[in-house]
Image: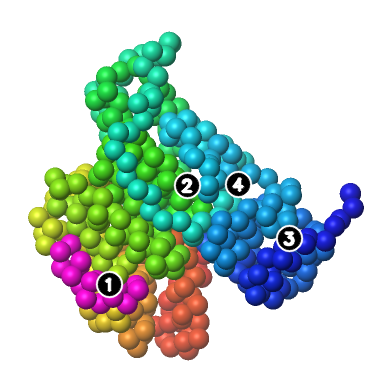
Amino acid sequence: MERRPNSRLRALLAEAGWSNEQCARAVNSVGAEIGLALRYDRTSVAHWLSGTQPRPPVPHLVAETFSRRLGRVMTPVAAGFARSGAPAAGLPGPRTPPAPAVRTLGALTGRDADPVERAALAGEPYRALGAPPPWSDGGDPDRRSAGRRGLARVGGAEVDLLRGAVRHFAAAMDVHGGGHARPALAHYLADTATTWLHAPGDDRAHRQLGTQSAYLVFILARMHSDMGCHGIAQRYLHLALDLAREVQDRVAWAITLRAMAAQALHLEHRRTALRYAQAAVEALPEHVGDAVRAFALAQSAVAHAAVGDRDAALAALHRAEEHGRRAGVGDPFGDYPSGALSFQKAEVHRELGDLRAAARALHRSTQERPAHDRRGLALTLARRAELLLRSGRIAEACEVWHQFLEAGGGLRSHSVVTAVRTMRGNLEPLSRHPSVRALLDRERSLG
């Protein structure tokens, strides 16, 4: 087939004011958000301009790159890539009205349960454009097929089983990391949860099943984020929002918005993170418990700190701590552990430049973490060690990093792997220091 120059891509480069090298760096950066170590340079872009079609998911990454630069949604076709493949079959595009949530749930988790399809889904880019969707009252009257034949009627027993699954998979994430139970959770959602959501039953049971399914989708999103797959994690969070809206659960809706704020901030989209964090707080119903309110306010505090709004950050943090003191523990979506709140407090102080206060809060967080939260403990220790090193306390930082290696051993978590790489990068220039040398020797022996 004759290769034709990509005039659309050339026009977009001119509109963006980018050189080939600048475009390549931007694509590499978008790829890094989903765990891809891309090494494109100006010659790569030159090949694309000459008509070369890069393999998926690169056309979608290029489209997302120009979307961010130009402030409007772009597609691979608009960038001149005709044979780009679908980023995720069964999922709506950026401007496509979403399919009913239960149907989308079955289509997406069915693909995610397959190893080959899961690898393809991992190439879905994180979409930085967009705003928090508005809440709408009323839900979807067609969210279930009450007269469907061949399915047993659902009720309280099925709701209890889903609640148990939420506790089980949330604990698996904490104990083993996001890479451990992803396939099992995808299978469970594709088979069991989807079947029950289609089965006949009363409206109350279906609303409760929808809420618990939204929480399971939320956990699956966290698992993908923990493995560095932020694009497909974002899709799952949007799906959790759709499920929450269909069953009119404003608490599940607000909790999901809060997670979207945390994801955006992790990827350095600070203003987007603030919009989602504010939307989460505003979405909370008046009757919501102290733990959930503290959970949303703590993320709002971090987001305000990240954009430099000190007064708003400290005010939100104060409110979060007040509610947190009255919160309980035990339910992964109804409680807020004090160790997690202390970590968010540390993030506020770190963003505001108070490293000593941040280190103290992180130390408290490590003491308050429950024994089963191995992933949370490991990441908290890594963050504390980084702050100690920035403060010049090398030996103390190394001691904490030793604890991090102990806590993180055996975890299947891209976040923990990234923390190890960060540790190594920070310490290698200091390798002559005895404490540093001993730590690096231990890390190499574990690898």
**Observer-nearest of 103 and 419:** 103
Task: Residue under label 3, please give it.
Answer: 8
- Picture coordinates of residue 22, whole percent (x, y): 65, 75
The residue at the point 73 percent across, 60 percent down is 8
Disc 4 from disc 2: Cα separation: 11 Å
- Give the label, 2 or 1, closer to the camera: 2
Task: Residue under label 1, please give it.
Answer: 348
Q: Earlier in the sequence, mark 1 or mark 3?
A: 3
Task: Residue under label 2, please give it.
Answer: 235
| Quarter where residue 156 is shown | top left
Q: Which residue is outermost to the top?
A: 149
Segment tinted magenta in the rendering: 305-320
Q: Secondary structure at mark 2?
A: helix
Three-letter code, disc 3: Arg
Three-letter code, disc 2: Arg
Is 8 a magenta residue? Answer: no
- Res 345 visible: yes
